[in-house]
């Protein structure tokens, strides 16, 4: 269903951007889209989607923050291993006093 909706939106945008029908056709399309958007059935689904997003937002925040912390700790572990300074090598300079 989502794929079909995206396809329709893409076709509509492509038509609007590619059309040579002029301003009248654009205004007619805009009027039809506005009419569909204000349809009570569409608005019911919009409200359902908004409520779903509000209900799931805390779960999404927890999921994202937990995984972000894991990624940060992994990155820190890799960078500290790579950027750790090498042990200084004792230089063996010959003694100049003989």
Image (spheres, rainbow, N blue to C red):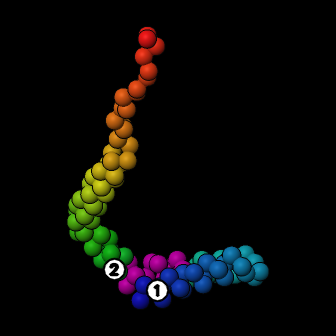
> How many residues crowd mark 1 within 10 Å: few (<14), some (14–19), many (20+)?
few
> To which residue does mark 1 refer?
3
> In the rendered structure, which disc, 2 or 1, sits on the residue that comes first in sequence?
1
Percent coordinates x, y for residue 4 in the rendering: 48, 89
Residue 97 position (above or below residue 50)? above
Relative horizontal placement of residue 11, taking residue 40 as reference (left or right): right
Q: Main secondary structure of the magenta part?
A: helix
Q: Secondary structure at mark 2?
A: helix
Percent coordinates x, y for residue 52 in the rendering: 27, 73
Q: Secondary structure at mark 1?
A: helix
Asked whether 38 falls inside the magenta stretch, the response is yes
State the residue in front, 44 or 96: 96
The numbered dot on residue 38 is none
Percent coordinates x, y for residue 51 in the rendering: 27, 71
Residue 80 position (above or below residue 74)? above
Relative horizontal placement of residue 7, taking residue 65 as reference (left or right): right
State the residue in front, 88 or 93: 93
Percent coordinates x, y for residue 38 in the rendering: 45, 78
Asked if marks 2 and 1 touch (Cβ < 8 Å), the reply is: no
Relative horizontal placement of residue 89, taking residue 17 as reference (left or right): left
State the residue in front, 21 or 32: 21
Look at 33% across and 48% down and name the residue there.
Answer: 81
Image quarter in which the C terminus is found: top left
> How many residues crowd mark 2 within 10 Å: few (<14), some (14–19), many (20+)?
few
* Magenta region, residue range: 33-43
The answer for how far apart the CA atoms under marks 2 and 1 are is 21 Å
Tell me, yes or no, if residue 12 can be seen here.
yes
> To which residue does mark 2 refer?
44
Look at 41% across and 89% down and name the residue there.
Answer: 1
Tell me, yes or no, if residue 72 can be seen here.
no
Asked whether 52 falls inside the magenta stretch, the response is no
Look at 42% across and 16% down and name the residue there.
Answer: 95
């Amino acid at each position: 269903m989502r794929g079909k909706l995206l396809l329709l939106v893409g076709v509509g945008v492509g038509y609007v951007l590619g059309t040579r029908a002029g301003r009248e056709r654009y205004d007619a399309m805009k009027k039809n889209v506005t009419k569909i958007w204000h349809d009570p059935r569409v608005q019911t689904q919009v409200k359902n989607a908004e409520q779903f997003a509000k209900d799931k937002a805390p779960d999404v925040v927890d999921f994202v923050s937990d995984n972000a912390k894991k990624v940060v700790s992994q990155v820190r572990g890799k960078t500290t291993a790579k950027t750790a300074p090498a042990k200084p090598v004792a230089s063996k300079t010959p003694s100049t006093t003989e």
